[in-house]
Image (cartoon, helix red, strand yellow):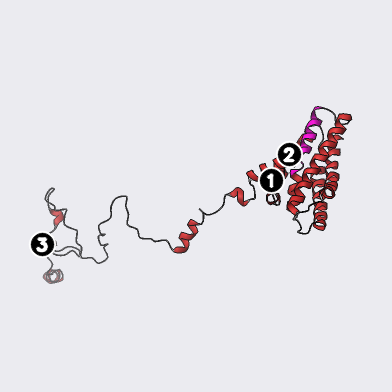
Amino acid sequence: MSGFDNFNTDFYQSSYSVDDQSQAGYGYSNTENTYNKPYGQYDYSQPMGYSSPGMMQPQQPYTGQIFQPTQTYTPSQSQSMYSSSFDDEPPLLEELGINFDHIWQKTLTVLHPLKAADGSIMNETDLAGPMVFCLAFGATLLLSGKIQFGYVYGISAIGCLGMYCLLNLMSMTGVSFGCVASVLGYCLLPMNILSSFGILFSLQGMMGIILTAAIIGWCSFSASKIFISALAMDGQQLLVAYPCALLYGVFALISVF
């Protein structure tokens, strides 16, 4: 037993002492432990210093003003030109070719056959007004009990194609298909008046025949006046008015019968 006691004494002998725990602990420097100070004696103005290199360093203080941050990004020249280009763009209706002032001037030109037509305005490809007048013509026929939308659009397409070929043969400058469709569509406005009268009374009597002939002459005269002013076809108004009268005569037959 004496040998066993000597073995235990030799095995557990060490230089470690419990008192050393208060002097060094777990990787911190041997400075005064500030966490052991009682409440009210800790100096919060001093930064916390650790000897571990993996700890995050304190951030730099913000030197700018509140609501006035310092500018750290400068847009490039291409980006500034791209942003300023939106101010120079035309309105959306103008890009689509819809100009209410020109639509109103064309409508007045059709309603007033003796008024001189402006060739620069009439040479534009404007299909907003013709589409409205075609829909109005079909709607007035529908109110009188005639569902003729297909005939209206079919006859309009065939008539525009025929007038396009004829005017290109007769004029020296030539004309686009959109311009022909625009002029013929605007001159369909008096035919809406005829179909509106068809809602109130029958157009198959003598008064109806006279009114129908007057409306056909109105439409053809307005269309031929616009064509000769836009295409500089002086002295050829009667030659242009004849095929226009044939086209609008078909629309008049739809309205009467």
Query: What secondary structure do most residues of the magenta stretch adopt?
Result: helix
Secondary structure of the residue carrying tag 2 is: loop
- Whether residue 149 appears in this view of the structure is no
Report if the CB atoms under discs 2 and 3 are less than 8 Å apart.
no
Q: Is residue 190 magenta?
A: yes
State how far apart marks 1 and 2 are (Cα). 20 Å
Q: Which residue is mark 3?
A: 19
- The reply, left or right, for residue 44 in relation to residue 176 is left
The one nearer the camera, 123 or 153, is 123
The one nearer the camera, 131 or 229, is 229
Secondary structure of the residue carrying tag 1 is: helix
Question: Residue 206 location in percent, x, y?
Answer: 89, 30
Q: Which residue is mark 2?
A: 112
Magenta stretch, residue numbers: 186-201
Amino acid type, residue under disc 1 in the picture: Ala
> Mark 3 vs mark 1: which is more N-terminal?
3
- Of circles 1 and 2, the one toward us is 2
Q: Residue at x 83, y 27 (%)?
A: 201
Q: Quadrant of residue 132?
A: top right
> Mark 2 vs mark 3: which is more N-terminal?
3
